[in-house]
Image (cartoon, helix red, strand yellow):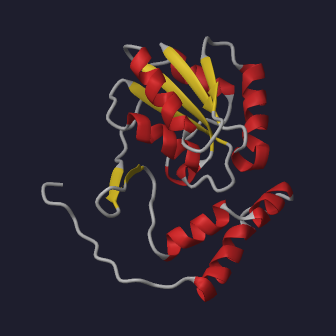
Amino acid sequence: MQILFIVNEAAGNGRGKKVWQQLQQQLTIAYEVAFTAYEGHGQVIVKHWAQQHQGKKLLVIVGGDGTIHEAVSAIVHNEYVLIGVVCAGSGNDFARYFPTFRNARQIEDYVKTAMVTTKIDAGFIELGDHHHKIFVNNTGIGFDAYVTKAINTSRIKLYLNKLGLGKLSYAAAVIRGLFRFNGFPKEVSHPEGM
């Protein structure tokens, strides 16, 4: 079985690099590794890798929710790729809803055993005529998206992450958003046939 670790070393303000270094020292199985270098790079890497190899494959994502989103978007309809996650982000929303690997032993045990899998749904959101995205655990528009964007572009999050207080950045962004966000009318529809 082909195994690829896709690693976002910058996830969780550098936590991704630390988590990967620890995993790497403990792994005894054959694997490939690729490191993301920019936003959207995970999608490019995974799409290329999935097309290169035939048969069952295991993709282990070491990063945060953004890295998971990129990887899943690249292979959402590929039935041969199994996905595993080692959390290394600041929010790790995915891990609240789905099981994740915690260490190298769990990954190796999974590969050596019958590999029980669970299928999960993926959603599709279309914003206008030319902008669409696939998502796994959640998506947001309006105030939620405003807060998320504010957090992801904020320098405060970097400083709070260094102090181990990254979750406070969400509270700060919500309070700030209450005063700055301008609401807008929006129509939500469910496509026929889905």
Residue at horizontal 44 percent and vertical 61 percent from the top: 139
Front-most of 37 and 6?
37
Q: Is residue 131 above or below residue 51?
A: below
Front-most of 87 and 106?
87
Residue at horizontal 52 percent and vertical 33 percent from the top: 84
Residue 185, image quadrant: bottom left
- Residue at far front of view: 130
- Residue at far bottom of view: 179
The answer to whether residue 112 is left or right of residue 78 is right
Locate the C terminus by quadrant: bottom left
Return the x and y of residue 117 as percentages of the image width and height.
41, 31
Front-most of 41 and 194?
41
Q: Is residue 185 above or below residue 30?
A: below
Return the x and y of residue 187 as percentages of the image width and height.
28, 76
Residue at horizontal 67 percent and vertical 81 percent from the top: 176
Asked if residue 115 can be seen in this view, the reply is: no
Q: Is residue 53 above or below residue 168?
A: above
Residue at horizontal 61 percent and vertical 85 percent from the top: 180
Residue 30, image quadrant: top right
